[in-house]
Amino acid sequence: MVDFVSDEFELLAQNARDAGLAWWARPAVQRVALTVDGHGVSALAWGNTPPRIVLLHGGGQNAHTWDTVVLSLLATAPGLGVLAVDLPGHGHSDWRADHDYQAATTARTLTAALRSWATHQATVVGMSLGGLVTIRLAAVAPDLIRHAVIVDVTPSAQIRRAAATPAEQGTVALIDGPAAFDSFTEMLDATIAAAPHRSPASLRRAVLHNARTDEEGKWVWRYDRHSEHGDFTTLWDDLTDSAAPMTLVRGGRSPFVTDQDAAEFARRKPGLTQYLVPHAGHSIQSDAPLELAAIIRTASQDGSGD
């Protein structure tokens, strides 16, 4: 089996089949890009209408992590516009020379990008690093966010990560692991070892979307290393300052959000809606995509009259 994809959308039928979703034909989807302050930002634009849902992935991931979630959303709303962004330093977006991918820095870039791509206030869904960026966006660019869905992260994330074992971290631990591999199989095996609860087929798709070969023929990740992991606790104040309604989604098998963290989140955001997906780990979009899609669907319709 060839270890590359010539068309980044050719695996979507596999996503649908594995999730038990009907597959008739490839939905309308294209890669789009623009430049913000000299840095290219790339995204997947689903549908033919302005995006009503914006998806921001976690650190070490890319826009394709949302593929099954989007297919589930489109199954009930075929004309829905969805934008899945490659965060700076990830996927097909440019790497920064200073390797600064902190929430505040990334939020500045995405504020400009989303104002260009999204002509309406959107439901912004952020997972892990993307969730921290979403919290910052809600505080500094409230015109962009109609409802924020924060997936398995709070401003205490770095504290929780430091306390978790590599096994508890799952694929997050790969970020601090080897940067290059001699073969695709070696890279895939490392990923399977980090996420033994997920099917090898789904992990193969994930690695194909998240890897490339370098000039020496080594397999390397399609994301940059951060200059520092940072202290995100200042985002608690951003959370307090934000006006957008929020939903917090936790993975029942994840160590990244404790009951204490969830309680503090709710204290800072009166009216917070919370969900617990018991069988999911940190990457809920991969472990329970249909359940997460249902939550996003509810959040995007809340108070909209749609």
Image: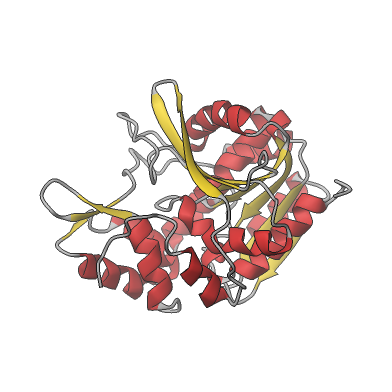
Nearer to me, 182 or 4: 4
In the image, taking residue 221 as reference, residue 16 lies left or right, namely right
Specify whether residue 22 is in view: yes
The structure residue drawn at horizontal position 36% and vertical position 35%, both measured from the top left corner, is 94
In the image, taking residue 185 as reference, residue 288 lies left or right, namely right
Quarter of the image where one finds residue 260? bottom right
The structure residue drawn at horizontal position 65% and vertical position 34%, both measured from the top left corner, is 118
Q: Residue furthest front?
A: 25
Nearer to me, 178 or 57: 57
Specify whether residue 165 is in view: no
Q: Residue furthest left?
A: 216
Quarter of the image where one finds residue 16? bottom right
The structure residue drawn at horizontal position 13% and vertical position 45%, both measured from the top left corner, is 215
The mark total stands at: 0
**Where does the image place residue 98, in percent across and percent down from the top left?**
32, 29
Colour scheme of the rendered structure: secondary structure
**Where does the image place residue 53, in percent across and percent down from the top left?**
67, 46
**Where does the image place residue 156, in percent across and percent down from the top left?**
55, 50
In the image, taking residue 221 as reference, residue 124 lies left or right, namely right
The structure residue drawn at horizontal position 78% and vertical position 44%, both measured from the top left corner, is 245
Quarter of the figure with the N terminus: bottom left
Quarter of the image where one finds residue 191? bottom left
**Where does the image place residue 88, in percent across and percent down from the top left?**
42, 37
In the image, taking residue 152 as reference, residue 32 lies left or right, namely left
- 231 over 290 or under it: above or below: above
